[in-house]
């Protein structure tokens, strides 16, 4: 589903990420592991097409994303990649349903209210469709962010530290949601984490070392 080749990224002239080679099959589930500062978020942003690598190739669903213009990359990301960031970035002026519909709009896809309703129902948020983000609990807000990430049936689902600062019960619940939703879409799942509690739940691990 994706292949990274001789990938590096620099910030202010310093190398902050190096990946010699990493590939993942469609539908596979991976943990991206490493301590704080090891480049996990940078690598996740490269996989999402938010950052372009300084050197090397990031091939997602057969497309070298470095070959795409900014507008083409936005459309490609919207149609193929879902991402749940550490900060959920739900727009406070929109309802939960509108936040999810926004993913369809940004991808240039038709507005499909039935699909939005289906995803919200599957995440036990049907009764929150008309609520604003400020009225949600943390768990509900996280589920709304997952709904937005999967509404377009992405081929690649990314999550950045989704269990950080959660107690054990909520950690298990968040991981269950990601695994279930990725499987429902047939998506490749990559979870960036330093949370040791999730290691046993996901078969494939890619380890980054500490930043130099």
Image: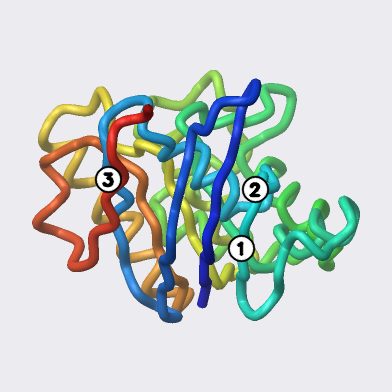
Q: Secondary structure at mark 2?
A: loop
Q: Secondary structure at mark 1?
A: strand
Residue drawn where x is 72% and y is 31% of the image: 94
Asked if the residue at tag 1 contacts the one at tag 2, i.e. Cβ–Cβ closer than 8 Å, the answer is yes
Asked if the residue at tag 1 contacts the one at tag 3, i.e. Cβ–Cβ closer than 8 Å, the answer is no
* Residue bearing mark 2: 53
Mark 3 vs mark 1: which is more N-terminal? 3
Picture layout, residue 79 above or below residue 144: below
* Residue bearing mark 3: 33
- Viewer-closest of 175 and 114: 175
* Residue bearing mark 1: 58
Mark 3 vs mark 1: in front: 1
Determine crowd level at label 1: few under 14, some 14-19, many 20+ residues with C-alpha closer than 10 A.
many
Quadrant assignment, res 40: top left
Picture layout, residue 162 above or below residue 74: above
Mark 2 vs mark 3: in front: 2
The answer to whether residue 104 is left or right of residue 175 is right
Q: Position of residue 52 (x, y in %)?
A: 70, 47
Q: How is the image coloured?
A: rainbow
Of the 4 image quadrants, the one containing the C terminus is top left
Q: Secondary structure at mark 3?
A: strand
Q: Position of residue 23 (x, y in %)?
A: 43, 72
How far apart in space, not on screen, are marks 3 and 1 (Cα)? 19 Å
Quadrant assignment, res 11: top right
Residue drawn where x is 31% and y is 45% of the image: 208
- Viewer-closest of 126 and 57: 57
How far apart in space, not on screen, are marks 2 and 1 (Cα)? 8 Å
């Amino acid at each position: 589903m994706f292949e990274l080749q001789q990938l590096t990224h620099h910030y202010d002239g310093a190398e902050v990420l190096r990946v010699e080679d990493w590939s993942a099959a469609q539908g596979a589930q991976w943990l991206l592991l490493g301590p704080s500062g090891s480049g996990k978020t940078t690598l996740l942003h490269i996989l999402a097409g938010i950052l372009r690598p300084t050197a090397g190739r990031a091939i997602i669903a057969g497309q070298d994303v470095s070959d795409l213009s900014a507008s083409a990359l936005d459309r490609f990301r919207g149609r193929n990649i879902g991402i749940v960031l550490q900060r959920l970035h739900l727009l406070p002026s929109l309802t939960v349903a509108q936040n999810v519909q926004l993913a369809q709009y940004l991808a240039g896809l038709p507005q499909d209210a039935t699909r939005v309703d289906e995803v919200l129902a599957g995440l036990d948020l049907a009764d929150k469709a008309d609520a604003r983000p400020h009225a949600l609990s943390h768990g509900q807000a996280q589920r709304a962010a997952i709904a937005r990430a999967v509404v377009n049936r992405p081929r690649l689902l990314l999550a950045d530290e989704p269990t950080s600062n959660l107690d054990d019960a909520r950690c298990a619940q968040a991981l269950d949601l990601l695994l279930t939703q990725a499987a429902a879409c047939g998506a490749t799942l990559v979870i960036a984490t330093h949370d040791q509690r999730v290691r046993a739940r996901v078969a494939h691990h890619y380890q980054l070392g500490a930043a130099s």
